[in-house]
Amino acid sequence: MRGWGRLAAALILILAGAAAAATPGINGRDDRRPLLHPDPSLDAVGRVNHGGSFCTGTLIAADQVLTAAHCLWDTREHRLVAPGQLHFLAGWRRGRYAGHAVAVSVELAPDLRLGADGVPADPLTDWAVLTLERPLAGPALRPMPFAGAADRARVADGAKLARIGYGRDRPHLPVLVEPCHVLGVVRAGRMLLNDCDATYGDSGSPILIATSDGYALVAMETALLHATGDVVGAALVLGQRRNLPASALAGKDPAP
């Protein structure tokens, strides 16, 4: 995959766009399957709410949630919202949830620069980690583990993926897309292009790989991208908690 400058421009236009009557990011058959019942291994995925807006977030530690930085932008005030305005509802289903807490602090990429529309100047900086007022993890709610090096190598070799999130057209139930696939990797292996159905509201949703112990976190969806007539997903490749985004996936084209 080459020509990152052109791809980035298209990605930003889609990321900042308003919802249309059609559902962008759903190509052909809609492969999203609602998760109707609580599941301790999947309810780490929930909604990050502020005001009337939401994105998807993932509990990655007992009191920490990973989401996209642009999700924290207040479109009316043209600024990042204060941590105390951010509510995380794990496993949100039609008014019920596995856990709820308010953020007390937010960690952002040190070099994050947001435009007046909340779009990051560099898509690789589009991540945020919320620290919650109290731990949410317990027997009915387990943080999502990060994929280890061996499982990230499986992704590079073409292993099937999954995605869980909350779309704007289906805001009150998490949906699972499985299987979906890697379409390519750009930015020296740090951004993964994929065919996992996703739309507005799904920013921040986890891209997962199935392991012997359940699902593990490989990447985080941040945007939609026009490519070859379709709309594809763009996700930040993740490593361990203190390495966001991660070192590159091995064996893929290190596009500039």
Image (cartoon, helix red, strand yellow):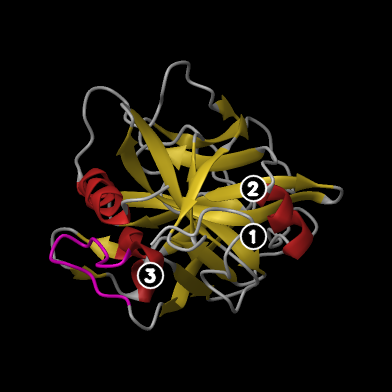
Q: Label 2 amino acid?
A: Leu
Vertical side of 111 occupied by 23: above or below: above
What secondary structure is marked by label 3?
A: helix
Tell which of 97 and 254 is nearer to you: 254
Residue carrying label 1: 250
Q: Position of residue 65 (x, y in %)?
A: 54, 65
The numbered mark at residue 125 is: 3
Tell which of 29 and 8 is nearer to you: 8
Vertical side of 6 occupied by 73: above or below: below
> Is 84 left or right of 133, judged from the image as shown?
left
For image coordinates 12% across by 65% down, the residue present is: 116
For image coordinates 85% across by 51% down, the residue present is: 213
Range drawn in magenta: 112-122
> Is 157 left or right of 231, judged from the image as shown?
right
Q: Label 3 amino acid?
A: Thr
Cα–Cα gap, marks 3 and 1: 21 Å
What secondary structure is marked by label 1?
A: loop
Mark nearer the viewer, 3 or 1 = 1
Instruction: For residue 42, say whether it is visible.
Output: no
Q: Earlier in the sequence, mark 3 or mark 1?
A: 3
Q: In terms of secondary structure, what is the magenta stretch mainly?
A: loop
What secondary structure is marked by label 2?
A: strand
Q: Report the number of discs.
A: 3
The numbered mark at residue 208 is: 2
The numbered mark at residue 88 is: none
Q: How many residues crowd around disc 3 within 10 Å: few (fewer than 14), some, or many (20 or more)?
A: many
Tell which of 120 and 166 is nearer to you: 120
Q: Label 1 amino acid?
A: Ala
Vertical side of 151 occupied by 130: above or below: below
Cα–Cα gap, marks 2 and 1: 17 Å
Residue furthest to the right: 212
